[in-house]
Amino acid sequence: MNQKVTFKNLLSTSQLTHDDISLLINDANTYKKNAKQNQIKNSKILASLFFEPSTRTRFSFESAIIKLGGNYINLEQADTSSISKGESLEDMGRVMSDYSDIIVLRHPDIDSMKLFTKYTTVPVINAGNGSLEHPTQTLIDLMTIYEHHQRLSNLTIGFWGDLKYSRTVNSLVQSLSRYNDNSFHFIATPDFQISPTTQDILNKSNCPFSTIANLDSFLDQLDVLYVTRTQTERFSKTASTYLNPLTKKELTNISESCIILHPLPRVNEMSTDIDTLDQAHYFKQSQNGLFMRMALLNNLLQ
């Protein structure tokens, strides 16, 4: 296995090789056991640039760099930067490279990463570009799945909720489709089913999958149930039109070995009574975000 990641910038899940994923999961677990291990030798500065709201992603990255011995500068709102004056993402990327050692960027435009990194000279991490991708969330999801099942292949994964606009679903499917013998069930109303692009990825990887509206028919077969909220920021219709909350009662037949994941935030798509189930792993998943992002920052700063 390689001893360092194969990329300088992490802009897409497609960059992650199996060796990259194994290395980062191992490093993240090392930090989980002892967060003081393998700190960066010289204090480094993270530029945390968020043009969309964030709780877990932003704060876990900022906490991660502090725990590694570095510091951060941040942008919480676009209107507090020169972007509000008309500055281009290309120019902003060039300038921020002079002020920081590594950059995390979240932006609503799916083309933002390509523009921003045109002239950057330090590593850049995609923290979400519109509805397209969220590669660091995928790493966290994979870490949480591996922790429980001790494998990333031969899994049956169910996705429930808004699958069309969810970048976390797009990224995770792209990654899991490259492991052997994984199969997928996508549970959503027609307006929220996976995109033709995601279906093409599955077809090219020869992954068996179904697009259905009923969770009951295979709930007892799942190794992972991945729930997502309605991405109301991506379209104009109301969430209540499409999704009724998933409740503990509906999960009566869930397998004991299945884990329930959710990238959070939870809004109205999943009842809090599910938190009492042993299969509920989404807060463990959120906790893993800190350790995985420590591992990623440390690797890219070497």
Image: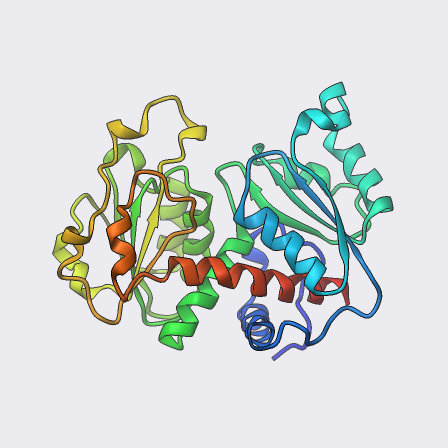
- Residue 237: image location, x then y, percent: 34, 23
* Residue projecting furthest to the top: 85
Quarter of the image with the N terminus is bottom right
Q: Is residue 199 above or below residue 82?
A: below
* Residue projecting furthest to the bottom: 1
Colouring rule applied to residues: rainbow
The image quadrant of residue 19 is bottom right
Toward the viewer: 284 or 225?
284
Q: Is residue 16 left or right of residue 211?
A: right
Q: Is residue 42 left or right of residue 62?
A: right
- Residue 79: image location, x then y, percent: 68, 24
Q: Is residue 80 left or right of residue 127?
A: right
Toward the viewer: 240 or 108?
240
Q: Is residue 272 left or right of residue 136?
A: left
Q: Is residue 153 above or below residue 81?
A: below
- Residue 58: image location, x then y, percent: 60, 47
- Residue 288: image location, x then y, percent: 50, 63
Q: Residue at x 62, y 48 (%)?
A: 126
Q: Residue at x 78, y 35 (%)?
A: 92
* Residue projecting furthest to the right: 98
The image quadrant of residue 158 is bottom left
Quarter of the image with the C terminus is bottom right
Q: Residue at x 24, y 41 (%)?
A: 245
Q: Number of callouts in the render?
A: 0
Q: Residue at x 46, y 44 (%)?
A: 167
